[in-house]
Structures are given as structure tokens and as C-alpha cells.
Amino acid sequence: MRVFGFIACFLPLFCLSQIGGELGYQSLNLTTNPRAAALGGTTISLSDGDVSQFFENPATLDSVKTKNIFLQVNPYFADVFVYSGAYTFNMASLGTFAAGLTYVNFGSFEMTDESGNDLGTFNAQDYTFQIGKAHRLGPFTLGANVKLAHSSIENYGSTALLMDVGGVFHVNKNWTVAMVFENIGGRITEYTSFSSPEIPFDVKIGTTFKPQYMPLRFTVTSTNLVDDNFTEERDAGGRSNKTLDRIWKRVNLGAEVLLNENFQLLVGYSHKRKQELRLADIGGGAGFSYGMMVKIKRIELRFSRATYHAAGGSSFISLRTDLNDFKKIL
């Protein structure tokens, strides 16, 4: 309890420090699990034992058992690959923790001098390691992730120490409301003495609800509630100047079709993605996403596809299992 009190006292100070400047560490905004990808790109209010959701909101960890393992690969675009993994474990009397790692490999690039002479190649990659904990207080759950993020380009690198703080209010077993403060903190080291990009701080609010007699679960998540993380709308012009459009660009919609415990279908929509990435005369499916979950024996497999542009989209593939289920085998 004293830990959460400390966070609450100092949270406003960290939030104010993120106003202004040029954003960096944009890999922190990438989707790191297929479920969130299929539900519009992000979802913070799903608390049903899925360890991958702790990347979105650490408060969802209260529903996750120990020895849950999650692995994901996302062939993003071109030669860029995003990998993520998470594992839950028990730490003596402190309870259940989750550890996660996200690795973004941007591939190799040609290096030239100012005259265009070939100097070889260089690599670029981002890493984010995080550890999270949640605590239940009646219908409320509070959680926090501590994150160490490192970005490197050739011989240049930058490191940041960050925190996510989230909460989930369980209205009833079929309805949750959540809020998350993402990427509170700052840089430890800079790329150069001339470069000081801001961390992409954000605030999200979301809800998940399931009608009692319907095999459907709906999710609504409001993102980009801090202007610093939404500067592109100021330059988009035209279709982004309408008040209603500006509101919808901050809302992600998703739905899960719960056919049974071993098979589910998912669909989602991001208006922001559609408006910013569609072509002038055709949307090409930009902003829409879909996915499926298949559970075979003790292993849960997920596949999702998010359409970013008429030219194509990005696929997400993951595996999740509970190692406790393998005790009899091992």
C-alpha cells in the first residue's frame, strides 16, 4: 500500500515533465500482443487471466496465475520485426510478478559518407524490459510496471527509465473500467548532446463489457488523451478539422465473439489509423483489424491481422500457456 501511495503522490510531477518537445522512443507505442492488435490496436480493460495484457495495463495482473508464459512475433513492415515475451512468477511473500521483454529489430541499413561512398552497413534496434505487479483492493485493482527502455542506432544509443501505472474497477463479473498512465519517467542517457527527444507519455481510459446472455464481449478504449502524443492531427488538415472526427480518432473499438472456450473470433477498428493512412480516394481497409484464438490442449494460439494501408498490413502470431498444466507430464 505504501508503494501505491508513493506513486500517487509523485505521479503529477512526472506527467507535467512530458509536455513539449519532439517525441522519441516511438517503439513504445507499438502493439505487443495479437489480442490488442485485433481489438483496434490497444485494450486496457481486459482482465481475464491473459498475461499478455500486462503490456497494456499492469493492473490486469491480478487475474493471472503464476507460471504463465507468452511469446509473440510480429513481422511489422519491410525488414522490421517485433518480438515480445512475458512470464509470471511468485516472489516469496511479495506475491505474483510478471516480467516482459519487447525487442524491435529494424534490420540493417547502408552507411555512406556525404559524397555517397559506401561505408558498409549498420543496425538499429530497441529493447524494453519491464516488470509488473498488481494489488487488489475490493473491486479496485492497482498495478505498476517499471520499464527500462534502450534504443540504439549504429554507435549511438539512448536509455530511459519509465513506469506505467494503471487501475481496473470491476463493476461486476461482466463489466470492467480501466485507466492507465503510460511511460512516466525520463531519459538516463542521450543519443548525442544535441538530441533530447521526449518520451511518448499517454493517458488511456477504457471499458470492457459482456451482455449477460450474448456470446459477445465489447471493448472501447480512448487513447491519445495527451496532446503530445497526437501532434499529427494538427498537420493532417481537411478531414481532421471536424470536431467529431477529432473525437473518434481517440477511440478504438473491438469485439470478441466467444464461440466457446477453445475458439474465439475478434474484430476491431481504429478511426485514427484509417484517417491518417487511407488513400485520397479509397480506404483500402485501413483501420480495421481481425483475429482468432484457438486453444489446443494446453496451448492457446492467436493470430491477428491489422490493416494499415491499401498496400497491406501487419500480422501478429502468439503462443500462451500455463506451465502448471504440464506438471503431470513433467
Image: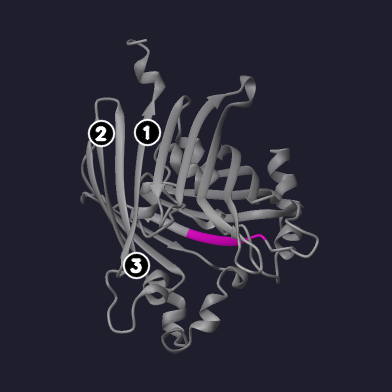
Gap between marks 1 and 2 measured at Cα: 9 Å
Q: Position of residue 21 (x, y in %)?
A: 70, 70
Q: Residue furthest right?
A: 193
The foreground one among 80 and 323 is: 80
**Which tag, 1 or 2, sits closer to the chain's start?**
2
Residue 312 in percent (x, y) is at: 31, 63
Label 3 environment density (alpha carbons within 10 Å; few <14, some 14–19, many ≥20): many
**Proximity of marks 1 and 2: CB atoms separated by less than 8 Å:** no
Residue denoted by label 2? 295
Residue pictured at 67% horizontal, 49% vertical = 162
Horizontal side, residue 189 vs residue 201: left or right: right
Residues at circles 3 and 2 in contact by the CB criterion of under 8 Å: no
Question: What residue is pinned by disc 1?
Answer: 320
Helix, strand or loop at disc 2? strand
Sequence order check: which comes first, mark 3 or mark 1?
A: 3
Way the structure is coloured? one colour
The kind of residue on which mark 2 rests is Lys
**Magenta segment, which residues?**
199-205
Would you say residue 88 sits in the magenta stretch?
A: no
Give the alpha-carbon distance from disc 3 to disc 2, as whole Å: 27 Å
